[in-house]
Image (tube, helix red, strand yellow):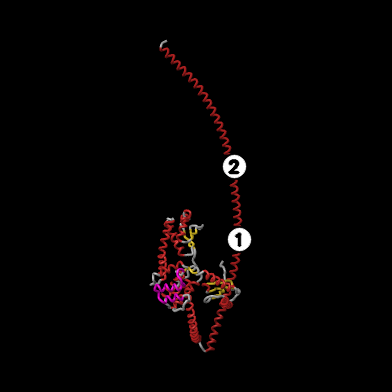
Amino acid sequence: MNIFTYILTFLLGIFGALFVFFIFKKRILSGEYKQIKISKEEFEEKTKEEFDNYKKKLDLEIREEFINWKNDYNQKNISRSRRLNENEKRLVIKEENLDRRYVNLENREKELNKREKDLNYKEEELNVFKNKLNEVYTEQNRILEKISGMTVSEAKEMIMKQCESEAKLESVQKLKIIESDLKEKSNLMAKDVISTAIQRIASEHVISSSVTVIDLPNDEMKGRIIGREGRNIRALENATGVDFIVDDTPEAIIVSSFDPIRREIAKESLETLIADGRIHPARIEEVVEKIKNNFDNYLKEIGENTVIELGIQDINPELYFYIGKLQFRTSYGQNALLHSKEVALISAFMAKEIGANVNIAKRAGLLHDLGKSIDRETEGTHTKISVDLARKYGESKIVQEAIASHHLDVDFTSVEGVLIQAADSISAARPGARREIFETYIKRLEKLEEVCRSFEGVTKAFALRAGREVRVIINSNELNDNKTFIMSKDIARKVQKELEYPGQIKVTVIREVRAIEYAK
């Protein structure tokens, strides 16, 4: 065999193998195709079945939705029909009412026309009567002129002269009454001016005498003030000598102490520490010590501002310290500095009214309780200490004597001393100045109103002007005007008999008649 035969045999083998491969592959592909075709048919049947089911389901949902919509529509139509029927009924009722009103208006119009005719007829009768009356009046004048022998103008002139002389006599009498009444009213006005001045300078009720509230920027600051295991607040209490109360009060700490100066130092120290932000024992001791050292200057500043406010000149600057210290002294709950300022203003005003020395009255009024600033540190009464301080710092003798006599320890030597004593009593006794007097004052007002209400026919009673006036409202149906004057005298007599009060009480009895009608 040659090489050509081998090649041919090899090629035939290759072609045979390829032929066998193609035949086998065709059979495989033919099987897969049949399988794919079968799967396709199954998928189409399944899809068609799902589509039919979905279509049926969708039809059912659409039908249900249509039925619901139809029901809603029917209900809305029924509701709309009901409203239309109700509106129709209301319109029918309104139409019937309008018809009735129209009939009433027609009847009223007929009645008015009839009244108008009657009035026209009466007016004609009145005109006829008026003409007859004028004729009679003219005839009467003619007869009177004939009898008296005077004309109308002559009679008028004679009457005017007679009335003129009587008027002059009455005017003289009236002038005397007016003059005496004017004097009485002038005295009342002067008293009213003084009482108005007292009311104008009246300050608020008593201040707190044992606690001070310090506002905090937030509640977290309480923890910083207390410190770890309470070391900061203990350092504050040890340095200031007061009690710090930290409770549930939001954004506030209470400083408690019966010494107002310690409370003020503690307040200033804590506010300084809060503003600075550094709160620890060493810093606390430093701030408290600094404020204690500067507190005398703070007291002098208060005293200086008080003197400037009152307009007092040429006062020794050394007195500023004692005046400022009165800010932290109370008497029966009344602040001593506010009391001294009130006494100075009241005495100065009264001195101006009666022509006394205003400057002396004001100086003595401010300094009359100066000894209270150091009476706990020095022996002697506060009046004696006040006189010693006034003498020490160059106040005049008349000022010293006015201070010495304000509690009647010595006799008065000047009218200014009397004014200081009166102003001191007024400031201490005014409503709200001191706790005990305020309670007595309220009871007196209640008793005054109770006495007035005890009379028959009285509906209300009101005490006014700090109990110096009472207004009584009576029932106008039970009492007439004449009994009103009698009742005012009876009430005044009973008040005078049963109550104790300074000065006098004005009793005003009011009987009011009101007529009320409504325009329609």
Q: Amino acid at mark 1?
A: Asn
Residue 401 included in the magenta stretch of the image: yes
Give percent across and percent down for residue 249. 50, 58
Give percent across and percent down for residue 429. 50, 72
Q: Earlier along the polypeptide chain: callout 2 or callout 1?
A: 2
Tell me if I can see residue 157 in this picture.
Answer: no
Residue carrying label 2: 64
- Asked whether 47 or 78 is in front, the reply is 47
Q: What kind of secondary structure does the magenta stretch mostly adopt?
A: helix
| Segment tinted magenta in the rendering | 376-405
Tell me if I can see residue 19 in this picture.
Answer: yes
Q: What distance separates the C-alpha of mark 2 from that of mark 1? A: 49 Å
Q: Quadrant of the N terminus?
A: top left
Q: Quadrant of the C terminus?
A: bottom right
Farthest-out residue, front: 379
Farthest-out residue, left: 314
Q: Residues within 10 Å of mark 2 (few under 14, many from 20)?
A: few
Tell me, yes or no, whether the two marked residues, 2 and 1, touch with CB atoms within 8 Å.
no
- Asked whether 381 or 39 is in front, the reply is 381
When asked about the image quadrant of residue 62, the answer is top right
Residue carrying label 1: 97
Q: Residue at x 61, y 60 (%)?
A: 96
In the visual, does 201 lie left or right of 131? left
Give percent across and percent down for residue 31. 52, 24
